[in-house]
Image (spheres, rainbow, N blue to C red):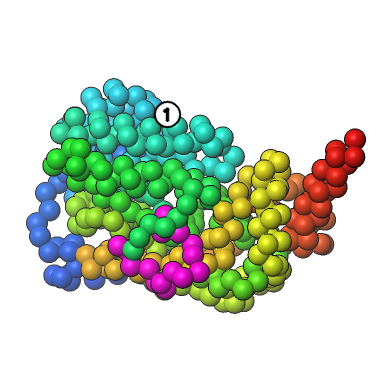
Amino acid sequence: MSSPDPTVRAARNAAAQTEQAADPASGATGRPQRQPVVAVTGAASGVGALLTRALVASDEVRAVVAIDERRGDIDGARWHVLDVRDPAIADKLRGADVVVHLALDLDLETDAAARTAYNVRGTQTVLTAAAAAGVHRVVLCTSAMVYGALPDNDVPLAEDAELRATADATGVGDLLEIEHLARRAPRAHPGLNVTVLRPTVLVGGTDTALTRYFESPRLLVVAGSRPAWQFCHVEDLVGALEYAALEKVDGELAVGCDGWLEQEEVEELSGIRRMELPSSVALGAAARLHRIGLTPSPAGDLAYTMHPWVVSGSRLHDAGWRPRWTNEEVLAELLEEVAGRHTVAGRRLGRKDATAAGAAGATVALLGAAAVVRRARKARRRI
């Protein structure tokens, strides 16, 4: 399935915006909105750059303050170049009504300790600085992964469901700590509103363990599991963040396409066949490969391809927001993005290795690597 023609999608998006604006119950026009000054951290790239560009173009925003470690190429924003962990950020936030904090590092290749130091310390500093500068709202972005991927999850999960994730998957420990900071901040800083958005599998120029899953020659399916896939296009996330920045929604909000896809639907749409393994084999091999540094993804990432963690998104819907992309469209976009890339167990392969992996199947390659590890250990014990 190919992604929709850009002209068609633009027309559809414009129609959706018109419909929301015309609906008095949508929340978009349910109460008069003042024009806030919005500050965005992580504004030079990724989702931060997309949001900054959207806010600069919005008639509902008075001014945009852009903060990053380098200056971006978006005109119309007031730029400040600094690390978000620098307490001097408080001076840069003075006069802002809302801060959208998007300066996070969830790169698979980043050292885990350095990543946590940046993500958690950066969020702590931004929350404290915002309160000191008189900002009345901070918008944070984590992930629906914080709900955890568990076999007994409701399908879909309510947004107020317990956060049952553990720190076993890439970056999830950081996101759980950010969630804790978000809940504690209004008590530590009375008058500060903290809104948290939790996107599902994010697609659109992203590189995560979950997008790399679709770079494999075969889709690893753990026997007895019941995966369910719910995607979120970055364009929809930006729209939801804009809603939060304009104070049209509050609280903890999930963001994603309507509904979800079963594993069989994903396989049919993608044309990628499955490779099924017992959980003990798949998880054991993944853990060993990560432990010796052969793959960037810990075994905990596999849980999110095994068990459901889809969400309802009802709070944004109640405010009048609607996703502009379907799960089928986002999957098609993802497949176009990863075409030509080759990954086994989260590790990118060169062309020569990819040919071998393609012939054997991604999981066979994973098990072969695990066998090499076992043989090496036996050899060391014999010495």
Magenta range is 146-160
**Which quadrant of the figure has residue 14?**
bottom left
Q: Secondary structure at mark 1?
A: loop
The residue beneath circle 1 is 70
In the image: residue 215, left or right of residue 92: right
Q: Magenta segment, principal secondary structure? A: loop
Horizontal and vertical percent position of residue 99: 26, 40
Residue 154 falls within the magenta-colored stretch? yes
Q: Is residue 11 visible?
A: no
- The amino acid at mark 1 is Arg
Observer-nearest of 126 and 95? 126
Which residue is at the far front?
382
**Which quadrant of the figure has residue 64?**
top left
Observer-nearest of 167 and 194? 167
Q: Is residue 226 visible?
A: yes
Which residue is at the far right?
383
- Determine the residue positioned at 27% across, 63% down: 316
Q: Is residue 347 above or below residue 236?
A: above
Horizontal and vertical percent position of residue 230: 46, 67
In the image: residue 303, left or right of residue 358: left
- Determine the residue positioned at 49% across, 48% down: 167
